Amino acid sequence: MLSLTFSIASSSSSSSTLSFSPNPLFPSKSSFNGIHLRLRSNVSSIPLTQRTASVSVVMMAKREQEMEEIRKLSTEQINEEVVDLKGDLLMLRLQKSARNEFKSSEFSRMRKRIARMLTVKRERELEEGINKRLSRKLDKKWKKSIVVRPSPLLLKLREEEAAEEAAEAEKAA
């Protein structure tokens, strides 16, 4: 059995040391004397707690602003936006599977936006007094009524391709 001892030493010069020293039961002729790591953190004028607090305040303000924008939309507009965002999400998945360039942060951004929209939609249902069971029933009916249409990203790509072809045709003429 191997006995391990850990020691963490910290000084005011903002460097930390982690030492790991094995104490074998049977002495060996190995040159291994343990692991010694030194981690030096970048010294910033703003303490870490204040930096993370200011970043989280800014992010929270952006979320609140986005929620206010969503709340200004009608329920029909929210439904259309959800369908468009889900189409964009599908396009992103296709781009990923085809190994095309894409921003991986778009996945989480779109999923969160969809979740916020559905949250506002559910808040409105609660205000109207619609219970959970009826809400699920209405959601199923709404999902069946969705007409599949091309995603806005796909339409934008098609327009760009058409513009490029028109420009090439003008050069050829």
Image (cartoon, rainbow, N blue to C red):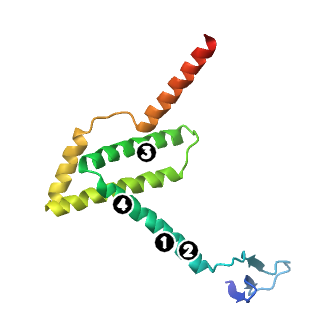
Q: Which mark is residue 109?
A: none
| Residue located beneath label 4 in the image | 67
Q: Which type of secondary structure does the marked residue at label 1 adopt?
A: helix
In the rendered structure, are the residues bearing label 4 and label 2 in contact, judged by CB atoms less than 8 Å apart? Answer: no
Q: Does residue 124 appear left or right of residue 19 in this picture?
A: left
Report the amino acid beneath label 4: Met
| CA neighbours of label 2 inside 10 A, class few (<14), some (14 to 19), many (20+) | few
Q: Which mark is residue 57?
A: 1
At 34% across and 33% down in the image, what residue appears? 149
Report the amino acid beneath label 3: Leu
At 58% across and 20% down in the image, what residue appears? 167
Q: Nearer the viewer, mark 3 or mark 4?
A: 4
Q: Which mark is residue 89?
A: 3
| CA neighbours of label 3 inside 10 A, class few (<14), some (14 to 19), many (20+) | many
| Residue located beneath label 2 in the image | 52
Residue 131 in sight here = no
